[in-house]
Amino acid sequence: MVFISEVFPNPKGDDAQGEYIKISNQSNSQISLDGWRVADASGKSFLINDQTLSPYGSLILNYSTTKISLNNTKETLFLYDEKNNLVDKLVYQERVGEDILVRKNPLSGEVIFLPLKERSLADFSENKINSLILKEETSTNNSNDFKTEFITPSLQLKDIFLLGFFVSLILTLIFWILFKNIEKDF
């Protein structure tokens, strides 16, 4: 599944120096984006050429590359494949404050606002993105306009605790049933 995972519409200072659109691949297959296109509601679009998303990877498209100026309020972005089929859409209505990321949950489609200063692993769980560990790496095209991120699933402490709780609950239930059956035999 390829989708628009994040946008940064209102960086501190000059928007043209920091705005970006991030496209992510949530599958375990490599996906060519050659001929794909990103567009906004005003009709401005950018054609992606010679880019491939690694499994669970992301591509960051800077303003300097796309020339798509992101609105700080009421923005709609579209992602089309090489056959011009709509693959994904990201919409936000609220005003996005300075240095706030707009991130889309790939499972629910929910859009959340994440302060840039909170873009650490400790804050991901509070912002419903607790299954990702991000490692940034520059892509092989030797351009500063593109950056690739590899995303790897990870269990959080609370997930391990919940799993342990449910396993112990099931084992308790099994032993209770066995004990009741043994008690009937005597």
Image (cartoon, grey):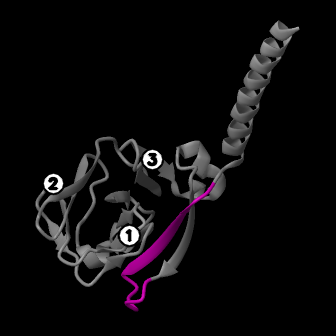
The amino acid at mark 3 is Phe
Q: Quickly name the residue at label 1.
A: 29
Single out the mark in the foreground, 1 or 3: 1
Toward the right, the furthest residue is 186
Q: Secondary structure at mark 3?
A: strand
What range is drawn magenta here? 139-154
Answer with mark 3 or mark 2, whichever residue precedes in sequence: 2
Answer with mark 1 or mark 2, whichever residue precedes in sequence: 1
Q: Secondary structure at mark 1?
A: loop
Q: Is residue 2 left or right of residue 42?
A: right
Vertical arrangement, residue 42 with respect to residue 18, above or below: above
Q: Residues within 10 Å of mark 2 (few under 14, many from 20)?
A: few
Residue at horizontal 39 percent and vertical 41 percent from the top: 108
Q: CA distance from mark 3 to mark 2?
A: 20 Å
The answer to whether residue 77 is visible is: no
The answer to whether residue 90 is visible is: yes
Residue 113, disc: 3
